[in-house]
Every structure is written in C-alpha cells, then in structure tokens.
Amino acid sequence: MAKVGVMIEGQEGLSWQRWRHICADADALGFDSLRRSDHLISLMDDPERDCIETWASLALAAEWTKRIELGPMVSPITFRLPAILAKMAAAVDVLSGGRVILGVGAGWNENEHSQFHIPFHTMKERFDMLDAAIPTMRETWSKSNPKPIRNPMPLLMGGKGEKRTLPMVARHAAEWNLSRLDSEMYAQRRDFLNACCNEIGRDPQSIRHSVMTSYIIGRNESELRERAAQVSRVIPSLSKLSPADVLENRKDLWFIGTPEQIAAKMSMHAALGVDLFMLQHFLLDDRDALKLLAAEVIPAVA
C-alpha cells in the first residue's frame, strides 16, 4: 500500500494562477500531499520563468485546500534564520489546520545564493547549520505563539549520504525522501537508515519513506509521445531528443507508461518499503494528467 503526491518545481514557470489551479486539483482529486521546491531562480537557465515565493504560496495553499498535506521540498537552512523559518512554518500550519510537513535541507545551489547575496558556506558548515537549526526551531515552537498544531512540527529530510544525512534523518525526521527512482539504492540506504535508528533506540517504522521522481503518463503510445514532446520543451537537457527518445531516455529514472504500467512499477517499489511517491509535475497546465493519475493509479497502489 502506498500513497501518491504532487511535487511542483516552483522555479520553473509557476505563476499564482497556475498554483491556484494545482492546489484545487491536487486537493479535490485525492492526492496525499502537495509540495513545492524552495528556490529563487530557474535551475534550467531560463531567467524569464516565473518563480513565486515558496512560503507565500504555501500560505495561500493552506487557504485554497481543505485536506491535503502541504510543505516545502525542501527549505534550505541558508535562506532563513531557523527561528524565523519556524515562525513562518507554524503560521502556515495553523492556517491549514495542522497539515504542514516542514522539509528542511542544507542548501546546494551556489548560483542562486550568489545572485541573491546569500552566504554559501562549505558543505560541512551547511550541514552543521542544519543540525543546529532543528533544536532552535523546536525551542521556538515551544516558546512562541501561535504554536503549530502538531508540536513539534514533523520534519522532512532528504538525501542519501551515510556520513551526515541518514544519521540526521534518524535523529530528527518524520519522513525521509530519496530523490531517485533506484530500487537497489533505496534498499541499501533503507537498511542503513534502519541501522541508524536502531543504534539510537528509535523505531525505524516511525519514519515515512518517500521517493521523488518525475512521470509521463498516457492512455496509449500517442498520448505518451505527446506529453514527452511537451516535457522536452520544459527540460533543456531533453530538448534535442525526439518524443520516443525522451521516453527511452527516462524509462528507468521516471514513472513512464500507461496507468497500469505506472501502478505496477509503484507497487514494486512499495513492496520494498516506499510509503509515498512524490511525482514532479513539470507540465503545470496538464490537469488531465493529474486526473488520470487520480482515477487509475492512486486506487491501484492504495
């Protein structure tokens, strides 16, 4: 049994109107979670693409939705002081009625830090900042009002590093995310995370496991190729490939196929322990794809 969520790369053309439609659709269609990235500029070298502010968009999502879980995936600790991030997250959580999961990370994109004059520290320093930020955020939630509905707020942490990331996940996170569709890697890191939990006396089952990847869905080959062509116009690295080659190029990295094929592949990964699939929805105006996922994939994997 697994659940399906929608993940939006908000720096790649997300406008307020598009966000409103995605919020309404994801909530009404029965997706489990709606998340968006926290970046400041396009990561695909297109400065003309809209990039609406993450926490302002989550506050609106709290009003525009009724039941779906919300959160960033993930907020770099370099962007905001920990206590300020905690206050912002608590405000959105209260507004939503307790539906926020706070995704936090160390930050990784040096270019956006440089463009916005944000200090970009060494990797060790950034991980130290992240580790130190979590007690500060929890202290903030205990002392300031309004407090989050779930206090302390559940944290999402992503990554696969065995030196810093997975031990940190074991100590702090309610959800661990692997941003790669790789069953062998997932199983190996899953076992390592379980060992980290056992070492500190935490039940490994208390951590939800999610995988984030993209998808191309179609009722038939014609629809698949049509969507592949649209995706190639969004992602520069695929722009020179034919639709057929896009499908071939991404078949092992993404969920690609008919609803039945995607559900079967999800079920295989769910059998290994994945609880939630966060699907990157690059075609922001493609409401039909979301409806197809909701109608035929979500019931099949649930």
Image (cartoon, rainbow, N blue to C red):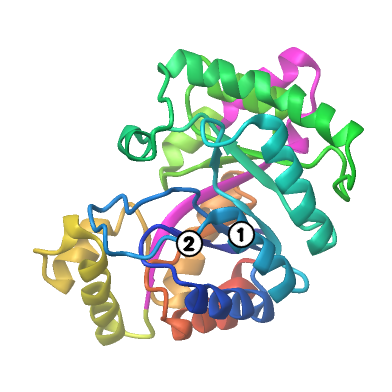
Residue 224 part of the magenta-drawn span: no
Mark 1 lies on a secondary structure that is: helix
Magenta stretch? 190-217
The part of the image, by quadrant, that contains residue 233 is bottom left
- Determine which residue is flagged by label 2: 52
The part of the image, by quadrant, that contains residue 256 is bottom left
In this rendering, the answer to whether 67 lies above or below 90 is below
Q: Is residue 125 left or right of residue 136?
A: left
Q: Is residue 278 left or right of residue 142?
A: left
**Label pair 2/1, CB-CB below 8 angstroms:** yes
- Determine which residue is flagged by label 1: 56
Q: Position of residue 84 (x, y in %)?
A: 69, 37
Tell me the crowding category of disc 1: few under 14, some 14 to 19, or many 20 or more residues within 10 angstroms, Cα based.
few
Q: Is residue 38 left or right of residue 219?
A: right
Name the residue furthest front. 117
Q: Position of residue 52 (x, y in %)?
A: 48, 61
The part of the image, by quadrant, that contains residue 65 is bottom right
Nearest to the observer: residue 191 or residue 101: 101
User: Looking at the picture, which amino acid does disc 1 mark?
Assistant: Ala
In this rendering, the answer to whether 45 lies above or below 137 is below
In this rendering, the answer to whether 156 lies above or below 50 is above
